[in-house]
Image: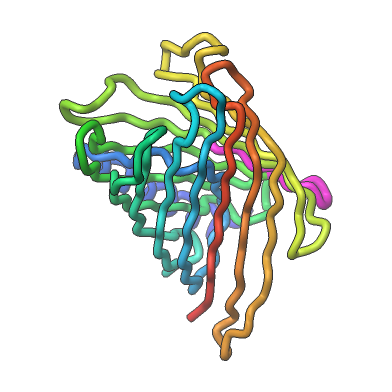
């Protein structure tokens, strides 16, 4: 890698560290995103309007009909940083959805795509909770991706910490992973995994963790754009409970409209 490329990577790491430090000082962190696997890649000049949601299904009333959705706006001003503003709504089983958090999300592409054995990025979020039991929080962690021919694999590993009287204490660990086959741009079958093992250093027994996995279909469809290069991306799937604490099924979906300036 050239000296200029190395300096660029270190500059991105410095910006990421500064933002993460500011998030801790601000004592804020977001609620966990709704069953989304983050990519480490960003595209300069891309604007996005995104919504995602989920709903759980189970015979037990305590795990049936949990639901939530997000609405987000993003714009990528550089070739390594994509900021996003997001609103989050969530509902417990048997209840309606309520506004629970506003989030300032940042995705950083730390290495050029394909230059190393794996591609690295990172997520840093700051969130303000609304309503009883929804604390302010910070969320931070690495995003790793690797391609094997037409097979793309992505891993997220995030660390979250609640702040304030409603906080649960400790640092929660969550993970997400995706493997997809790039068959056609509009139809890419795959599988996703999501896990919530518990607090750092005090993981719960596997049966008491919220672990889910299942098939997904991911796609990218170009749209008429009047010169703006618009496209529609989607990610839909059904997750099966992979541990006793998880609901038996979860329907999830994500739709993103993107265009360029």
**Is residue 16 left or right of 232 when viewed as pictured?**
left
- Would you say the magenta stretch is mainly helix, strand or loop? strand
User: Which one is in front, 242 or 194?
Assistant: 242
Q: Position of residue 72 (x, y in %)?
A: 40, 60
Foreground: 247 or 2?
247
Residue 136 visible (yes or no): yes
Q: Is residue 147 magenta?
A: yes
Residue 95, horizontal then vertical, whole percent:
35, 38
Q: Left or right: where does residue 123 sit relative to residue 191?
A: left
Colour logic: rainbow
On screen, residue 50 versus residue 235, left or right, reads left
Q: Position of residue 81 (x, y in %)?
A: 44, 59
Q: Which residues are magenta?
A: 146-156
Residue ranking furthest to the bottom: 226
Of residues 4 and 131, the one nearer the viewer is 131
Res. 18 in view: no
Residue at 42 percent across and 69 percent down: it is: 77
- Residue drawn at x 22%, y 43% is 130
Give the quarter of the image for residue 67. top left
How far from the left and from the top, in percent, is residue 65?
47, 36
Q: Is residue 226 above or below residue 21?
A: below
Q: Nearer the viewer, residue 132 or 126?
A: 132
- Residue at 42% of width from left, 12% of height from top? 201
Q: Residue at x 56, y 50 (%)?
A: 40
């Amino acid at each position: 890698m050239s000296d200029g490329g190395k300096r660029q990577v270190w500059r991105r790491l410095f910006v990421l560290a500064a933002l993460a430090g500011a998030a801790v000082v601000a004592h804020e962190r977001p609620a966990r995103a709704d069953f989304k696997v983050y990519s480490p890649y960003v595209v300069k000049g891309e604007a996005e309007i995104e919504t995602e949601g989920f709903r759980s299904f189970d015979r037990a009333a305590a795990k049936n009909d949990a639901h939530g959705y997000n609405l987000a706006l993003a714009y990528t001003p550089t070739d390594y940083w994509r900021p996003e503003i997001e609103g989050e709504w969530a509902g417990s089983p048997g209840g309606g959805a309520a506004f629970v958090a506003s989030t300032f999300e940042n995705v950083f592409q730390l290495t050029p795509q394909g230059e190393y054995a794996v591609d690295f990025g990172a997520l840093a979020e700051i969130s303000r909770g609304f309503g009883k039991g929804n604390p302010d929080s910070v969320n931070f962690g690495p995003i790793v991706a690797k391609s094997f021919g037409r097979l793309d694999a992505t891993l997220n590993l995030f660390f979250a910490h609640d702040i304030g009287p409603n906080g649960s204490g400790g640092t929660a660990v969550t993970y997400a992973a995706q493997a997809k086959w790039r068959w056609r741009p509009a139809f890419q079958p795959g599988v996703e995994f999501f896990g919530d093992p518990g607090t750092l250093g005090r993981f719960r027994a596997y049966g008491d963790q919220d672990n889910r996995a299942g098939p997904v279909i991911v796609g990218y469809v170009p749209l008429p754009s009047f010169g703006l290069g618009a496209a529609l991306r989607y990610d839909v799937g059904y997750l099966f409970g992979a541990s006793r604490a998880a609901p038996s099924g979860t329907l999830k979906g994500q739709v993103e409209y993107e265009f360029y300036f």
